[in-house]
Image (cartoon, rainbow, N blue to C red):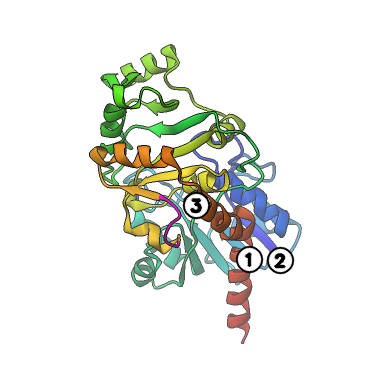
Amino acid sequence: MKILYLSPDMSAYGSAGYQHDVMQELAQQAEVSFYGPGFPAYHAGDSLADAVAKAGFAPDWIVCGHAWLEDRPGAAVNKFAHIDLTRTDVPRAAILNKEYTNLAAKLEWMRGAGMSVILTHHHDAAGHERRSGVRTVFWPFAADHRLFHDRDGKTLDLGFSGILQNPTPGNQSDLRVRVMQRLFECDGDLPVRLREWCRDLRVKFNALPRSEAQRALAEQSGLYRRMGTGEYAAFVRSCRAFLCTRSPADLVSPRYFECMLSGTLVIAERSAAHAAIFPEGCLLEFGDEAEIQGRLLEAMEGAEAIVERAQREAAARHTWEKRVASLLAELSSCRATAAA
């Protein structure tokens, strides 16, 4: 299949790697021309016809990647108005990103741009389809099985990495803060020392504080550091268990799949979204910071059966290799249906 993929170059994007993971894997399974800021062929004055001509082939599909639309709350979503997708008969697809910001505007743009199919990481694909009038497929996150595996030894009992509270319109709670305070004696958002009940555990809590001042202190003291891809993957692989709390809009983040592939137990905030992806018995759930103590001790006493079940499930169904194959199958099915 030949695809013109519209996206900025995401290879140096620091906040998350899934956008780049999808692009890399897609290039392994299809003939792809990437077009957007950062790629050599891109020019801000190009029309859609120019972009297609620069692909060097007649595309079977045009796919708008994760970063083609604007995610900043309240901003106009169409960052590249000079690429008018209504001016082609080539079928179009779009990957919906960060469903907790500008969702209505994104869906409206996708409908107006003539998308044949939308892929969403959010479990409420049916709701998005009702709002957009465009076929919408639930396409969960995944992970790279080449980076996340269990061939390393476990040197830590519990890990966490990320911001303490996401300042987005998704109304994320402060549960991460409260869990940290249950585990550690804290100075504001800085975890100073483990509390008595868990002092024998090996815990790495790589948490980015909420204020600029405490972020600076955390980085200066070594309590927080932004990790590169390889370092982060090694960290996940090194942990017996990892803390996962709800993302904005209840998205089930790539971290679940990264942990499962790594043989790392997921200890996750309870969410109905889990059942839309995982069979029962693939993770340990908790409701609040009071419950985390029992769950963590349960994990340390032995959760091998859960870890093994989750790892088999992730390897069979939740790698980017398999997820991109399902995307290509969906595009082929759409094209066959349209031609019938």
Q: Does dot 3 land on a helix, a strand or a loop?
A: helix
Amino acid type shown at disc 2:
Met
Q: Nearer the viewer, mark 3 or mark 1?
A: 3
Q: Is residue 298 above or below residue 69?
A: above
Amino acid type shown at disc 1:
Leu
Question: Residue 139 lies in magenta, yes or no?
Answer: no
Q: Is residue 253 above or below residue 126?
A: above
Nearest to the observer: residue 327 or residue 253: 253
Q: Earlier in the sequence, mark 2 or mark 3?
A: 2
Q: Say the numbered circle drawn on residue 328.
A: 1
Q: Which residues are magenta?
A: 279-283
Answer few, some or many: residues within 10 Å of disc 2's Cα (few below 14, many 20 plus, some between 14 and 19).
few
Q: CA distance from mark 3 to mark 1?
A: 33 Å
Can residue 80 be seen here? The reply is: no
Q: Nearer the viewer, mark 2 or mark 3?
A: 3
Can residue 151 be seen here? The reply is: yes
- What residue is pinned by disc 3? 305
The answer to whether the residue labelled 2 contacts the one labelled 1, judged by CB atoms less than 8 Å apart, is yes
Q: Is residue 222 above or below residue 143?
A: above
Q: CA distance from mark 2 to mark 3?
A: 40 Å
Nearest to the observer: residue 202 or residue 97: 202
Nearest to the observer: residue 34 or residue 24: 24
Q: Does dot 1 land on a helix, a strand or a loop?
A: helix
Which image quarter: residue 337?
A: bottom right
Instruction: Give the residue furthest to the front.
Output: 301
Q: Nearer the viewer, mark 2 or mark 1?
A: 1
